Image: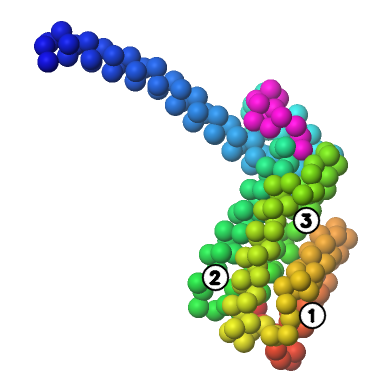
Amino acid sequence: MTPDHMESRLRISSGERAMSTPGRAQRVDARANRGRILDVAEEVFGKGGESASTEEVARLAGVGIATVFRHFPTKAALLQAVLVRRFDGLREQAGALLDTTDPGAAFFDFFRHLVADAATKIAIGEALLDAGGDRDGEAAQASNGLRRTVGALLQHAQQAGAVRDDVELPEVYALLVATSRTAAHPDLEEEAKARALAIVFDGLTPDPSRRSG
């Protein structure tokens, strides 16, 4: 290769880097904005429910409302993405417990965690429905993924003898949903929530006189 050709190649290579670097930077900025919007939206709608607004999300995220809608064309799309990420995160947490040496504690601890998480999740879900979101959309699919992983935790706990073997996932999940909605009630005292959860756990253990979790 002649010096002229080498110099030409270097100029082309440098030009390509100069052109590609801004593109990469823009993509990184876009991902950062999207993540920040989701973080803020989860907090805002988790506290404010359907009364919260995308304008408030944009303000707290430090971006323009146009940036929010560039990532999420509608309020429902934003809320759907928030719920999908939340359900996926919970599913990953549950999946990480499948290899534990104490399946009973893993099941009951995660059951307790889901109940504690319920108020925020319910508020976001209600905001999604109020915004015209699809009940059978991506959030519902992500919720089903979480349900299946909870089922795996239940099965492991039953195999370890920590949960009654005559119960199945549908009724256990019904108990989980009911307990979660009860715990999310703003007027229910913490002591009452703890007692209700203890009663549910006692009913799920093979020996009602011994509490697990």
| Residue 161: mark | none
Residue 56 vs 7, above or below: the answer is: below
> Is residue 46 rendered to the left or right of residue 13?
right
> Is residue 70 rendered to the left or right of residue 202?
left
| Residue 199: mark | 1
Q: Is residue 87 visible?
A: yes
Circle 3: element type: helix
Q: Position of residue 146 (x, y in %)?
A: 66, 60
Residue bearing mark 3: 119
Magenta-highlighted residues: 65-76
Q: Which residue occupies the extreme right position in the image? A: 187
Residue sitting at x 62%, y 65%: 149
Residue sitting at x 78%, y 56%: 119
Q: Distance of mark 2 from mark 1, alpha carbons? A: 25 Å
Q: Distance of mark 3 from mark 2, alpha carbons? A: 25 Å
Q: Position of residue 76 (x, y in %)?
A: 77, 38
Q: Where does the N terminus fall, quadrant-wise?
A: top left
Locate residue 93: give its quadrant.
bottom right
Instruction: Tell me the kind of residue under disc 2.
Output: Leu
Which numbered disc flags the more N-terminal residue, 2 or 1? Answer: 2
Q: Position of residue 208 (x, y in %)?
A: 75, 89
Q: Position of residue 59 (x, y in %)?
A: 70, 29
| Residue 98: mark | 2
Residue sitting at x 61%, y 71%: 152
Closer mark to the observer between disc 3 and disc 2: 2
Instruction: Tell me the kind of residue under disc 1.
Output: Ile
- The residue closer to the viewer here, 25 or 192, is 25
Q: Residues within 10 Å of mark 3 (few under 14, many from 20)?
A: many
Q: Is residue 113 magenta?
A: no
- The residue closer to the viewer here, 115 or 194, is 115
